[in-house]
Image (cartoon, grey):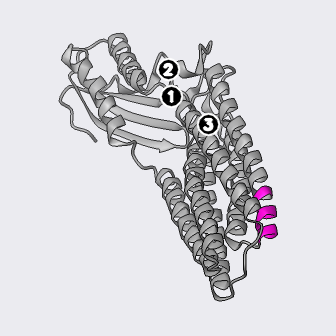
Amino acid sequence: MSGPPAAAASNLGAGRDPNLGAGRDPNLGAAPGRDPNLGAGRDPNLGAAPDPGARAAERAHLALRAGRIAALTAGGLALGKLIAGQLGHSMAVTASAVDSLTDLFASSANALAIRLAHAAPDRSHPFGHAKIETLATAGQGLLIGGSGVYLLIEGVRRLLSPEPLRLAAVTLGAMAVAALITAALVAYLGRVAARTGSSAIQADAVHYRTDIAANLAVFLGVALTYATGISRVDGVLSIAVAVYILASAGSLLRLGVRDLIDTSAPEERVRAIEAALDALRAVGEIAGHHALRTRIAGHTLFVDVHIELPGDLRLARAHAIGDRARDAILAVEPDAEVLVHIDVERDEPA
């Protein structure tokens, strides 16, 4: 339950509703040079962006470039593994090639989703398009799960009807090179995900991290097959890779569903926001706070909180304190979309 100054002060940020971009009607989209999905903070990892709009463009550029690099890398790995698998008659290597082929489609879809997710809010989507990344993450999980089922079936078939392997240098060399390239890609995607907060790039990094282990498993299995002459090892290994891929798909689906159902931010991030508000209370800026809510949508964290102030404060004073509460939250979550409500001291939440 909000007091009289609530609508005028807290929801207006610095004289304007933070959902209104640069003071414009939300139905008209965002004002030039500012993305309303990105708070007012700056990330030192991205350099000295002159304004939030430039910083948003930088984030989008980094994420989109990473998505394209991942897609190109996956395409090259798929082609190399497919050739090696066919030449060496290895179903395990061919299975890994199919996995890389799905990586190509998934990373390509991610690149498109990233571009769309960073588009400015419009009349139909006044809160932005951040959840497009979330949809891409969930879609990637489904696609990878389908490839896992296919590889599981092919592994069982090869287990029942084994074929001798050949060209050890080709198959083993291909898997060793693939593992090294994938490791470099994972390191790169991890850095970009940390700098941009992109859930799609994070999903790509998680997925390719599982590929490193899968590539090493195939390498060791094929080497064992050559060393022992037991052809069924190849089929067993294909099944193991398929199960690993299915587990990876489940992880990505959980990541996507988490955002689609508006899950709260991780506990440590919520505690950091609470600590910032408690610091304001400790110095007497606010009497308290309640009804803190957070939700994640793609690369954006939405924060909604009620702060408590004396009922006899002048509107301008309450407005200024609301601004400082918002800025305190942005100090710990620079890219958050923050909405602060002002309630009369000791008022109960609605």
Tag 2 and tag 1, C-beta contact below 8 Å: yes
> In this figure, which residue is indicated by the disc labeled 1?
335
Q: Is residue 208 above or below residue 166?
A: above
Q: Which residue is mark 2?
A: 41
Residues shaded magenta = 80-88
Q: How far apart are the alpha carbons under marks 1 and 3?
A: 22 Å
Which of the 4 image quadrants contains residue 162? bottom right
Mark 3 or mark 2, which has the lower sequence index? 2
Residue at image position (78%, 62%) is 84
Q: Main secondary structure of the magenta part?
A: helix
* Residue picked out by circle 3: 188
How would you rate the neighbour count of disc 2 (Cα within 10 Å): few for under 14, some for 14-19, many for 20 or more? some
Question: Which sits earlier in the primary sequence, circle 2 or circle 1?
Answer: 2
Residue 271 lies in quadrant: top left
The furthest residue to the bottom: 160
- Amino acid tagged 1: Asp
Element under disc 1: loop
| Quarter of the image that includes the N terminus | top left
Identified by mark 3, the residue type is Tyr
Residue visible at 40% across and 27% down in the picture: 7
User: What is the distance, in whole Å, between disc 2 and disc 1 at their CAs?
Assistant: 6 Å
Spatial distance from mark 3 to mark 2, Cα to Cα?
A: 24 Å
Identify the element where label 2 is drawn: loop
First in sequence, mark 1 or 3: give its number. Answer: 3
In x, y percent, where is residue 304? 39, 35
At 48% from the left and 16% from the top, the residue drawn is: 15
Res 129 visible:
no
Quadrant of residue 344 within the rendered picture: top left
Q: Given the image, on which type of amino acid does mark 2 rest?
A: Gly
Q: Position of residue 279 (x, y in %)?
A: 25, 20
Q: Nearer the viewer, residue 78 or 343?
A: 78
Residue 304 lies left or right of residue 336; in this view the side is left
